[in-house]
Image (cartoon, rainbow, N blue to C red):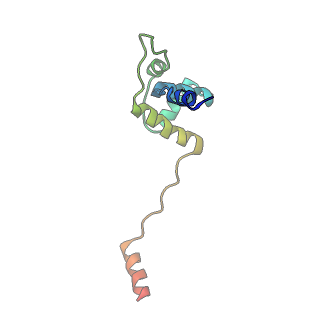
């Protein structure tokens, strides 16, 4: 393979749509539509089974709907919670008087 052939092979790439990414993740993680709806609900994103089915149709189908960035973003954020669990509650801030006491001890 010469340099010209290598350059041609590397420039022929196709961009995946948000729908393609969702489809690939669904297959790779063996997720059912109910699982995906549950994942989206973890981040307070509501979607019906019908609307979800429209995202997974072929592009040439009349009922096909393009998944926006918001759908993919919420799915990925929900997937993190689904797989790892929620983050623990952050520690409460120190009271102002506790900070003053610590500063007095330094002096």
Residue drawn 53% across the image and 38% down it: 79
Q: Position of residue 20 (x, y in %)?
A: 50, 25
Instruction: Determine if residue 106 is in view.
Output: yes
Work out whether residue 53 or residue 104 is closer to the camera in this orientation and state it. Answer: 53
Q: Position of residue 77 (x, y in %)?
A: 48, 40
Q: Position of residue 22 (x, y in %)?
A: 51, 28
Relative to 74, residue 105 above or below: below
Q: Using the rendered view, name the quadrant where residue 67 is placed.
A: top left
Relative to 41, residue 107 above or below: below
Q: What is the total number of numbered labels drawn onto the structure image?
A: 0
Relative to 29, residue 103 above or below: below
Q: Position of residue 51 (x, y in %)?
A: 43, 20
Q: Quadrant of the C terminus?
A: bottom left
Left or right side of 68 for 76: right
Work out whether residue 66 or residue 40 is closer to the camera in this orientation and state it. Answer: 66
Q: Quadrant of the N terminus?
A: top right
Q: Using the rendered view, name the quadrant where residue 5 is placed.
A: top right
Residue drawn 42% across the image and 13% down it: 63
Instruction: Determine if residue 35 is in view.
Output: no
Left or right side of 27 for 55: left
Residue drawn 42% across the image and 34% down it: 45
């Amino acid at each position: 393979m010469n340099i010209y052939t290598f350059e041609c092979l590397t420039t022929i790439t196709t961009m995946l749509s948000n729908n393609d990414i969702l489809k690939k993740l669904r297959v790779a993680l063996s997720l059912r539509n109910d699982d995906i709806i549950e994942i989206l609900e973890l981040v307070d994103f509501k979607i019906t089974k019908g609307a979800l089915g429209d995202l997974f149709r072929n592009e040439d189908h009349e009922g096909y709907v393009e998944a926006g960035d918001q759908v993919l973003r919420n799915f990925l954020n929900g997937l993190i919670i689904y797989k790892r669990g929620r983050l623990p509650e952050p520690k409460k801030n120190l009271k102002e008087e506790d900070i003053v006491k610590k500063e007095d001890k330094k002096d």
